[in-house]
Image: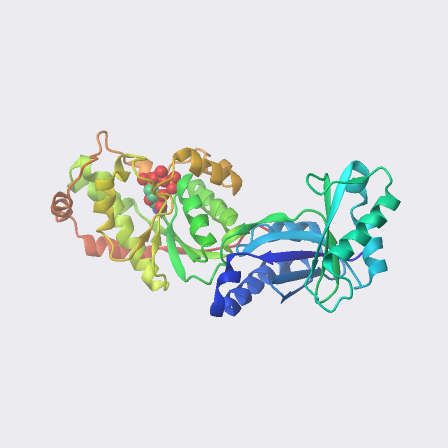
Amino acid sequence: MEEIILIKLGEMVLKGLNRNVFEAALIRNIKRRLNPLGGFDVKIAQSAVYVTPREGADLDAAVERVSKIFGIAAFSRACVVKKEMSAILEASAQYLKPELLAAKSFKVETKRADKIFPLKSPEISARVGEYLLERYPHLRVDVHDPDVTVRVEVRDFGAYVHGPALKGAGGIPVGTGGNAAVLISGGIDSPVAAWTMAKRGLELTAVHFASPPYTSERAEQKVHRLLARVGEYSGRMRLFTVPFAKVQEEIMAKCPEDLFTLIMRRFMMRIGEKIARRESCSALITGESLGQVASQTLQAIVCTDQASEMPVLRPLIGMDKLEIIEISRRINTFDISIEPFEDCCTVFTPKHPRTQPRLPELLEAEQALDCESLIGECVRNAVLTKIYPNQ
Ligand code: ATP
Ligand code: MG
């Protein structure tokens, strides 16, 4: 039996004139993710994408990957047959045989996108229902709460039979919303922030601040592994690792201790912004969540925000930690995030960080530093790593 993946588009169906752009991006993203698995043909028609495996292609792995591509509302594995009633009947009985044998009740749902097909949807459903009752006499029809729903679709290229549709990753295809640079730590929040914005169609560049010799090579590897997981959704990305120890040492030596974290965060924003502009990004993304820690009170965020002129997207701003953790488990970053490696933020932590800072104080404290040259040096010394999604 020939099997394909039948994909239903998400929100982009609503996008009117831009629809072609969204569809093209989705097709490109699907091809890019599936190509390494061996050959698949990918085509689009009537708001559905058809992924057809060529000889020897790994359909199970393809299903797993398709489930992580943004822009897809739902998808199913389906068996494809000729648009003839006899073929449809046979496929309905065979393709879902294990499910039908295990079930007590079923119903048939038919969609007829090809209006030339001689039977109307209710007639097709009735014929398939009768046939299944003959073949599986233990079954009864239950249209309200069936154990199994047999779905038949008569479309452009053939007739398709499948069981339940699986939920897609939702969102908008990556690459259709522009580019943004995510400030990524090894923590729980920033990978979730990256995923959340990729879901809205943004293509990601990543910036990570590392503080060797205070932080280790393994802490950087952890960030690479986190991004490779995010990349299963967002696609490949460029990561810039910024050597940050000198900035931290300077702040420690020359600024009041209770302002240390905020001044450091302001440096992160300024350096992030410079790299982001160079990489043609139009916004920064952080994993900040209001009130989560001393540096994320409203007043602290106001002061951090003033450091860069670029818009800062903070998708987690109104979420509880438990909500964030739930997403991080779902996207498989949680187990890496909780590995105990030091982060540059945990190396120099003041005992009593200020929670109600005022901008003038920060600006004054920063006068003690040669900000421009420190920032310039960090940007120049940032190391590029290309991150590829986990295969
Ligand atoms: P996370 O779980 O993302 O580390 P957090 O709750 O630990 O967040 P902070 O350490 O205050 O919060 O960091 C807030 C945000 O600043 C992070 O979500 C991230 O966007 C950015 N950030 C923090 N540390 C780094 C770092 N070492 N490199 C790049 N960005 C960072
Ligand atoms: Mg952190």
Relative vertical location of residue 267 with respect to residue 179 in this rendering, above or below:
above
Quadrant for residue 214, please give it: top left
Residue 362 as seen in the image, left or right of residue 248: left
Residue depicted at 77% across the width and 56% down the height:
124
Quadrant into which the N terminus falls: bottom right
Residue 87 as seen in the image, left or right of residue 115: right
Residue depicted at 58% across the width and 61% down the height:
32
Front residue (pair 380, 260): 260
Quadrant for residue 53, please give it: bottom right
Front residue (pair 221, 226): 226
Residue 249 appears in the figure? no
Relative vertical location of residue 340 with respect to residue 245 in this rendering, above or below:
above
Residue 115 appears in the figure? yes
Quadrant for residue 385, please give it: bottom left
Residue depicted at 78% across the width and 36% down the height:
104
Relative vertical location of residue 48 with respect to residue 304 in this rendering, above or below:
below
